[in-house]
Amino acid sequence: MKILIGYSNPMDITAFLEAIGNHKITSPFSYKHITIDFVELGYTAFETAFKMGKALQKERHHLVLFAGLANSLNNRMKVGDVLNVINDIPSGIGKENEDGFQHAYQLNWLDSKKLPHHRGGFINMSSAYFNVFLPFMKTAAITTNVLGGNQHTLALKLKLFPIHIESSNGLGFQYACLHEGVPFYQLRVIEENFLDSTSDKALARENLNKALQQIIDLV
């Protein structure tokens, strides 16, 4: 079995790498019955889409994962929660005027009915290994160039998009995987909640690494 794991920062998955004996991020790396490839994707959507696209075109994988941190825009999503991003929405593309902000789907710059777009976002409809990911709450996300913001910006995001969390590169991952037609999951752990001003990166990384180990041991 071949798995591809993408990440933004190697520090996010250090404990998992140590646990499987991959101390220098060797890629590919053999663990039990699995061959794991690793790719560092950076923090921007365009870099993530480019690097993930190259990795996916290089060879076929049975499962593709993104393991990273995210910020919560919902009081239900607490710091340390491990989430499975089902829908990722492009939020930073649009037009601002005196009446507010219109996003790309409202302006018809993007066709929500044309693949890989689906119902106003990039939706993961993969059912591969779904039993492995059942413990992780499903969620919707936006990808934005500016994380967080003042109260006005946060209120605008929540008004425009039916989302719970945000990241700076999730959309690039979903786009590349949907374009290449591979089974994938975007795994995110909350490191900061912008609504209640709580944060704990160490806890988020700890839970992310535990989740990765759990997934690899079950597939």
Image: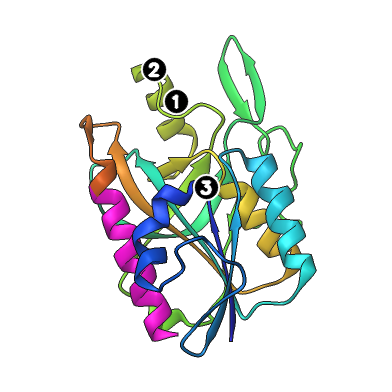
Q: Give the percent coordinates (x, y) of residue 21.
A: 41, 72
N-terminal of the two: label 3 or label 2? 3
Identified at 20% across, 32% down, the residue is 196
Give the position of the N terminus as an image quadrant: bottom right
Dot 3 alpha-carbon crowd within 10 angstroms: few under 14, some 14 to 19, many 20 or more: some
Dot 1 alpha-carbon crowd within 10 angstroms: few under 14, some 14 to 19, many 20 or more: few
Residue, disc 3: 8
Q: Which residues are magenta?
A: 203-219
Q: Amino acid at mark 2?
A: His
Q: Give the percent coordinates (x, y) of residue 42.
A: 58, 43
Q: Is 62 left or right of 111, judged from the image as shown?
A: left
N-terminal of the two: label 1 or label 3? 3
Secondary structure of residue under mark 2: helix
Q: Are marks 3 and 2 in contact (CB under 8 Å)?
A: no
Q: Is 115 left or right of 23, judged from the image as shown?
A: right
Identified at 45% across, 29% down, the residue is 147
Q: Amino acid at mark 1?
A: Leu
Q: Give the percent coordinates (x, y) of residue 41.
A: 60, 49
Viewer-proximal residue among 118 and 62 = 62
Marks 3/2: CA–CA distance? 28 Å
Q: Is residue 219 above or below residue 185?
A: below
3 or 2: mark nearer the eye? 3
Secondary structure of residue under mark 3: loop
Q: Is residue 18 magenta?
A: no
